[in-house]
Image (cartoon, rainbow, N blue to C red):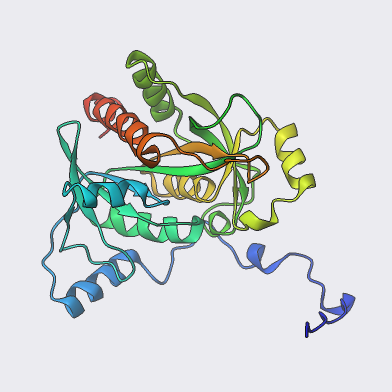
Amino acid sequence: MAIPAPPFNSENALPLPPILENKDAKSPSVFLPSALIREARRQKGLPVVDVPEICILDPDGDIVRRLKAEDRAKRFDAWPCYHTDLYTFSLGGETVGILGCVVGAPFAVLIAEELFACGCRILISLTSAGQIVALENPPYFVIIDRALRDEGASYHYAVPEAFAEADPRIVALASDALKKAGLRSIVGPSWTTDAPFRETAAAVEAARAKGILAVEMEAAALYTFARTRGVLVLCLAHVTNTMGLTDRDFEKGEAGGTADALMILATITKAMRSASNVVP
């Protein structure tokens, strides 16, 4: 039997929700990624080895599964993380790192902090996303240039603002590289949510009114983290569905969308590596 929720008590109402209380973006954190990495290495007996300079987050895990099935991915045994496995593989002649199933803003930023503390210099996130503005039939790719901050992690890194902005240099670089390669992509904003099963009709319509192209779960937090830390992060959305509102939804393309995804990633990583004005 369902237990009814307690009645709302106005005496307990706060002027600000807890997510916005006691936040000072300029104040240093007590807990640092370097401390977690130090203790993980000690406990696991791991050597100090840098991760690849370019790393990829694969929240759906489809790319990692394909690479492992084809024996193209090698486990990076020196990765000092308690929660994930890091794999390396060759992408466009470059050895890159990839982590699967890093889903949601808090988890993505946790792993991003650890990656950059371990030698990563460029992080690319490629996540599946739901369509908001119907530009064309899914699947297709969006280079996210800004993300609506409807998640919690970013408010621990920066003062409240509606959007988290990408670095315009890497957005332009990625867009130009894909155009030159004849690969289709769209540049535009996304909506980052912590609660995918609470995408109400009113919330979707409000996002659509802002011109938002897709809804996903990581970009706003990753971009806020990147701006705060001064690091390079690019977020891509693979728009694969209409949130289950049509039949035969969530079709990602050839090999679960991984064929197109790997072409997109290879083109962007090659362009980033050759752009000395963007990558330090």
- Residue 200 pos. (x, y %): 75, 50
Residue 147 percent coordinates (x, y): 57, 40
Q: Is residue 74 above or below residue 29?
A: above
Quadrant assignment, res 191: top right
Residue 137 lies in what quarter of the image? top right
- Outermost residue, front direction? 247
Task: Classify 94 as above or below 150.
Answer: above
Q: Quadrant of residue 260?
A: top left
Q: Is residue 90 left or right of residue 228?
A: left
Q: Position of residue 146 (x, y in %)?
A: 55, 36
**Residue 92 visible here:** yes
Count of numbered circles on the image: 0
Q: Position of residue 54 (x, y in %)?
A: 25, 42
Q: Residue at x 79, y 84 (%)?
A: 3
The answer to whether residue 26 is visible is no
Residue 60 vs residue 35, the one in the foreground? 60
- Work out which quarter of the rendered image holds the N terminus and state it: bottom right
At x 34%, y 30%, the residue is 264
Q: Nearer the viewer, residue 130 or 178?
A: 130
In this picture, is 88 found above or below 181?
A: below
Q: Quadrant of the C terminus?
A: top left
Q: Which residue lies at the image location 30% right of the left edge and 35% below the top edge? A: 262
Q: Nearer the viewer, residue 70 or 94?
A: 70
Location of residue 61 with respect to 80 vertically, above or below = above
Question: At 29% from the left edge and 55% from the top edge, which residue is drawn?
Answer: 115
Q: Classify residue 12 as left or right of residue 179.
A: right
